Amino acid sequence: MVATGQFNSPMLSLQGLSYAFSDVGSAKPIFSDLSIDVQEGEFVSVIGASGSGKSTLFKLIAGLIEPDQGEIWLGGVRADSRLGKVGYMPQKDLLLPWKTVMDNVLLPLALTKQDKREKTQEIREWLARFGLAEYEQAYPHQLSGGMRQRAAFLRTVVTGRDLLLLDEPFGALDALTKRKMHSWLLELWGDLQKTVVFITHDLEEALLLSDRIYLLSGSGGSGVRESKVSLPRPRSSAFIYKPEFIEMRKELERLIDDES
């Protein structure tokens, strides 16, 4: 597979990362001496079997937990303190049920003590681009699953961080809604100007959205395989029927079989 383009500078660098869960009288290694780089402007997916450490990796990058060994660099600077320096969207949307869509989206500004009034018009423009203009004053229970995920994604974008971590954001959606979300994100991607690291179990989703894909082995070692996606941008959901897409999926499946 061949890369889709060239990127300017590293946004995220994991160097010799090791982490183990502490258990009674022992430690269960998740991975050790793991090294991954993500370039500025890339969309990189992380795949692997359950228990391979994908969500743990995100918690390390976000600063929710600390590695046993290794270094994490953000924007070319060693980041020993990382809380609040990346946008992090977990698997569940975590929208506050007592707040409207607008108030949920504005929440990051309240946490950083920014003036919400100055940003309201800009947020309204983004709500329109996210297909949520008519739901500004709606509450989460009044939204479909896809709308809730779009609202949660916009809230992550509003953090203003250049690096976004998306942990299976479409995993709980039905197949038809997920396909619509892919089309929506592909149309929006060029305007976001963000670097995204994306966890998924869906190989089609990883290939359709990504510039590169990392496969974690889950063996407790440094096993990570990289695949570069040769599909040109802009893309559409119709790409999944292209012969080159089908071949890349077969190659990913072969790598997964080799790891297992």
Image (spheres, grey):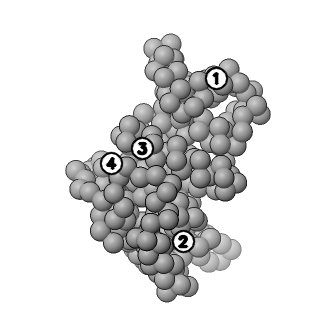
**Amino acid at circle 3:** Trp
Which comes before the other along the chain, label 3 or label 2? 2
Q: Mark 2 points at which residue?
A: 48
Question: What's the distance in space between the residues labelled 4 and 2, CA to CA?
Answer: 23 Å
Nearer to us of marks 4 and 3 is 3
Q: Say which quadrant the C terminus sits in.
A: bottom right
Disc on the earlier residue, 4 or 3 = 4
Q: Position of residue 98 (x, y in %)?
A: 75, 27
Q: What type is the residue that disc 4 sits on?
A: Gly
Q: SS for tag 4?
A: loop
Q: Name above or below for residue 249 compared with residue 84.
A: below
Q: Tell me residue 21's x, y (percent).
A: 59, 69
Local SS, label 2: loop
Q: Which residue is drawn at the image coordinates 34% and 65% (left, top)?
A: 230
* Kind of residue sitting beneath label 2: Gly
Helix, strand or loop for disc 3:
helix
Give the residue number, with chain letter if any, for mark 4: 41
Query: Which mark is in front, 3 or 2?
Result: 3
Instruction: Looking at the image, tell me whether mark 1 or mark 2 is earlier in sequence order.
Output: 2
Question: What mark, if any, has residue 134 been given in the picture?
Answer: 1
Label 1, label 3: how many angstroms apart (C-alpha)?
Answer: 22 Å
Rate crowding at label 3 as few (under 14), some (14 to 19) or many (20 or more) other CA atoms within 10 Å: some
Q: Mark 3 and 2 residues: CB-CB less than 8 Å, in contact?
A: no
Q: Report helix, strand or loop for mark 1.
A: helix
Q: Distance between the residues labelled 1 and 2?
A: 38 Å
181 shown above or below 23: above
Q: What residue would you read off at disc 3?
A: 189
